[in-house]
Amino acid sequence: MADVLPTQVYVVDDDPSIQRALKRALETAGFAVEIADDALTFARTMQPAGPAVILLDMRMPAITGLEVQRTLLARNVHTPILFISGQSESVEIVEAFRNGASNFLLKPFKLEELTDAVDKAIELDAGRLAASRHFTDVRAHFAVLTPKEQEICLYLVRGYGNKEIGELNGSAAATVKLHRRRVLAKMNVGGLPQLIEAFHGIDLVELQNQQSAS
């Protein structure tokens, strides 16, 4: 059985009273909460280990919420961000969403609004992480295939039959069948439908280019 990664709510706000109120409310609702006192350090070093959401204040003295968001994106950290703000310009809200914000809550907000938004963001992040792990696993298995097997694999995923593959790459039918069996075994799938499903959502051209460059 796969390990279940812990979920985490990061509160990034410069007001200690807001920190305490959010921590108390969210922990009462069953969430694990971590306070980030230094927003700049958080933006530069944050590395979530499991599904998480960032509660991010828009207006802080040393760095704005948008700057924190930009810094995280530049570091390729895509943990969902839930902005909280007492007042914000519409242009700030638009940029926050354009950069992938999960939600934007204006203070004061109801606890139910907050917990619902946090639940949805964590569910979104859990799905993102699961997809990332799946793609990493598929790419790792694909890298083990020989160049010829990779070629056959991509033909199979694109829906070509054994005869068509043989005509395209000049292989005998028996050779294609042999490579097909090896592909299914090395990709750790039970059959062609599972192989196609495993590659769902993966850019095959990008994958092929990556393997050619390695």
Image: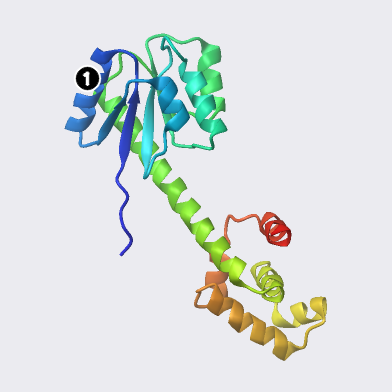
Q: Nearer the viewer, residue 139 or 44?
A: 44
Q: What secondary structure is marked by label 1?
A: helix
Residue matched to label 1: 20
Left/right placement of residue 35 relative to residue 136 reads: left
Q: Residue furthest bottom?
A: 174
Residue at the left extreme? 28
Q: Residue at x 38, y 30 (%)?
A: 54
Q: Nearer the viewer, residue 27 or 143?
A: 143
Q: Looking at this view, is 189 or 114 the one in front? A: 189
State how the image is colored.
rainbow
The image shows residue 39 at horizontal and vertical percentages of 40, 21
Task: Name the quadrant containing residue 204.
Answer: bottom right
Residue 141 image offset from top left, x and y in percent: 55, 68
At a point 39% along the width and 46% down the height, the residue shown is 126
**Quadrant of the image containing the N terminus:** bottom left
Q: Is residue 153 left or right of residue 193?
A: right
**Residue 2 percent coordinates (x, y):** 33, 61
The quarter of the rendered structure image containing the C terminus is: bottom right
Q: Amino acid at mark 1?
A: Arg
**Image-based side of 128 in relation to 34, left or right:** right
The 10 Å Cα crowd at callout 1, few under 14, some 14 to 19, many 20 or more, is: few
Q: With 80 as the anchor, is 18 left or right in this view? A: left
Q: Count up the numbered dots.
A: 1
**Residue 181 placement: quadrant:** bottom right
Residue 123, position as x, y percentages in the image: 37, 43
Q: Reply above or below: 66 against 144.
A: above
Instruction: Tell me what residue is drawn at x 68 percent, y 61 percent.
Output: 211
Q: Quadrant of residue 210?
A: bottom right
